[in-house]
Image (spheres, rainbow, N blue to C red):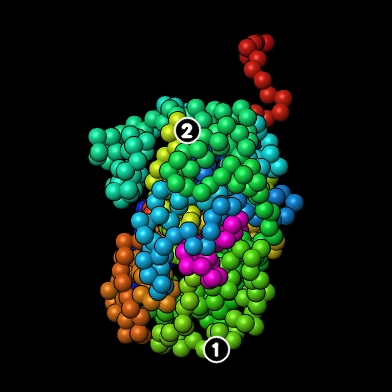
Amino acid sequence: MTTTDTWRSRAGTPFTPEKQPARGSRGMVVTNHPLASAAGAEMLAAGGNAVDAGVASLFALTVVEPMMVGLLGGGMAHLRLPGGEHLVLDNMAHAPRAATPGMYRPVSQDWPAALVTEGRENEVGAKSIAAPGNLLGWTQALARFGTLPLADVMAPAIRLAKRGFAATPYLVECVREASRDMVKDAAISALYLPGGEPIAVGHRVVQAEYAAALEVIAAEGAGAVHGGALGAAVVAHVRKLGGVLGEDDLRAFQVIERQPVRGTYRGVEVVGPPPPSSGGVHVVQMLNILEGFDIGRLGFGTAETLHLVAEALKIAFADRAAATADPAFVDVPVARLLSKDYASERRAAIDPARAQDWQAAVAAGESANTTHVTVADNEGRVWCATQTINSLFGARILIPGLGMVPNNYMALFDPRPGNALSILPGKRLTTSMSPLILLKEGKPWAALGLPGGLRIFGSAMQAVLNLVDHGMSLQEAVEAPRIWTQGQALEVEGAVPEAVRAQLAAMGHDVVALPHVAGGMNAVRFLDDGGLEGAACWRADGTAIGLGGGLARAGVRFWPDLRRG
């Protein structure tokens, strides 16, 4: 009997992974587009390391996954070095210096309706653009930890932008979803809504202006945007349209190196990003709570297990307001939230048979439209990075002449003055990004991450349960059905059977079935034989590419007269 059959008998939750994992000995690249994974694999084949490959993949994703990520966005990268050091590079966007607490007019003073502002100015268009950090984050990581020149690492992205690529159904679906806003901007419409209609599947997307801008950056470095002519052009257009981003915001942006948070779950060390990400803190918090239950015995996908996961999620969101903040502005009680003793207090209040109201107090929403890259090389480096422009196609405009799509990160601030997440000049955005690296006996065991806004850290946590408690393969772990709640409805993916949903409803959960929870997870597992396994899930165009083979054995060369006497 297979493990999937065992889960079916316990939970009535059968699922068969749709994709196949990849194996490699010299490196592994997993991204949410096959061409971006190929760009990373090209760097490994050229002798580069995981950072070279990861940064090349991200540049390529700005071309082939333009709805999710761009140079004018923000994100977090979790890096493990061959010597065992972990660090988190924080290039999250922040409020421009000219931003003010009352720059938007919310349609309501009640939460969460207050996030909607008059004219949707915080969501769409120039006033929604925060100071970006992606380009600086990537180029600084490459300079510090990579081995290849920036021009080499950017070459696949430039090639893809010049020659074009075939639009996937996923990209076309995203264009349709954002088209009502995109059609108002002539530059972005020309690319994705020619003739006023969304591009068709297979349409060749050519981005000549963006290719030219990338070539300038490849020659001049990030300074071309952060202090140079390209940045001046970005700001001029944003200001022309009424935005507040300034050239000083681009020149002064700082990538912050942070120390990750750590915890343990049944002997596995979990290492993740610290605030302003709530991901690492709350993944560890939830695992601490669930460690007191025999999740493996209860079984994957059973109502009993899903109930406990849901209660842990609600507890985490009840505490999230304290942990989701820029630590430069808020004193975050990280140690308390990571404490096993605190988890025991919270666990003791869980009713294993009944849903409870944990008075969740979520302070802000987050877009689910992001991307994630997980890369490992054979020297021990791991690059686990989640990056975004926030919503689908960010601000839903394009900078003419440059082909760049800016973020709409200002939508995540509280537009009401005087609150914890209100707008302040220079204040860094909060996030649920959870690029996780799992260790056994101090050595990497798995690395994973995904897009999905508020649903990221709960989905990452469930993947840890799948690997540790349920003994799933990596492919099964990233594709397994997920659930999510922040204290109101309990979202369950369609693969959760009606009988299990009914049991959850009988426990007091308001169950809502959805096509998917969060986005495409990309993961790498480190095998006992020294090999690498990569897996991407069905929720995006994810593809794993492993590098095997290698150079010729020393001393071998061709002798044309080898068979002569």
- Residue stretch rendered in magenta on the structure: 412-438
Q: CA distance from mark 1 to mark 2?
A: 56 Å
68 displayed left or right of 99? left
Residue contact between numbered discs 1 and 2, judged by CB atoms under 8 Å = no
CA neighbours of label 1 inside 10 A, class few (<14), some (14 to 19), many (20+): few
Residue closest to the eye, 479 or 217: 217
What is the three-letter code of the residue carrying label 1? Ala
> Residue 171 in magenta?
no
Q: Residue at x 45, y 40 (%)?
A: 240
**Of the residues shown, which amino acid type is indicated by label 2?**
Leu
The answer to whether 208 appears left or right of 254 in the picture is left
Instruction: Please report the residue visible at 62 percent of the width from the left and 37 percent of the height from the top.
Output: 227
Q: In which quadrant will I find the C terminus?
A: top right
Q: How many marks?
A: 2
Marker disc for residue 194: none
Instruction: Find residue 1 and report its image quarter.
Output: bottom left
Q: Earlier in the sequence, mark 1 or mark 2?
A: 1
Label 1 element class: helix
Name the chief secondary structure element in magenta: loop
In this view, which residue lies farthest toward the right? 83
Q: Quadrant of residue 367?
A: bottom left
**Image coords of residue 318 (percent x, y):** 50, 78
Look at mark 2 in the image and give the residue it sits on. 402
Mark 2 burial class by Cα count in 10 Å: few <14, some 14-19, many 20+: some
Residue 347's quadrant in the figure?
Answer: bottom right
Residue at 49%, 86% (x, y): give it.
350
Residue picked out by circle 1: 348
